[in-house]
Image (cartoon, helix red, strand yellow):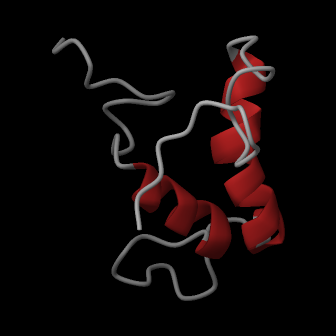
Amino acid sequence: MLLGLVSSDWPVVSIDSRLGMHTALTRQMLGGQPPQGFIPEQRLILDAILDTYTRGSAVAEFAEMEKGTLTVGMLADVIV
């Protein structure tokens, strides 16, 4: 295994968080398959997905007092 190339289900899913967010939102692969999505009732709303990938990740590593939100005094990596 290559260090740094892991995610919760690697190698089943990509390490690219944008693809994970797309799947959570649509429950589809990038090609739009299946048309109705995998278990479509498990789709998440964008707000919940963004919270999970930011604040939720910080909580998971017990670092929510240092990062995870765009708040004055918190650590942040922002890509525009």
Q: How many marks?
A: 0
Q: Is residue 11 left or right of residue 45?
A: left
Q: Nearer the viewer, residue 70 or 2?
A: 70
Residue 8: x %, y % from top left: 51, 27
Residue 11: x %, y % from top left: 31, 32
Which image quarter: residue 72? top right
Q: Is residue 25 above or below residue 76?
A: below
Residue 34 visible in the picture? yes
Single out the residue that lies furthest toward the front.
Answer: 73
Q: Is residue 65 above or below residue 70?
A: above
Residue at left offset 83%, top offset 70%: 41
Q: Nearer the viewer, residue 70 or 37?
A: 70
Which image quarter: residue 15? top left
Residue at left offset 71%, top offset 32%: 73
Residue at left offset 80%, top offset 20%: 65
Residue 57: x %, y % from top left: 67, 30
Q: Is residue 41 above or below residue 10?
A: below
Single out the residue that lies furthest toward the bottom.
Answer: 35
Q: Nearer the viewer, residue 52 or 43?
A: 52
Q: Is residue 10 left or right of residue 42?
A: left
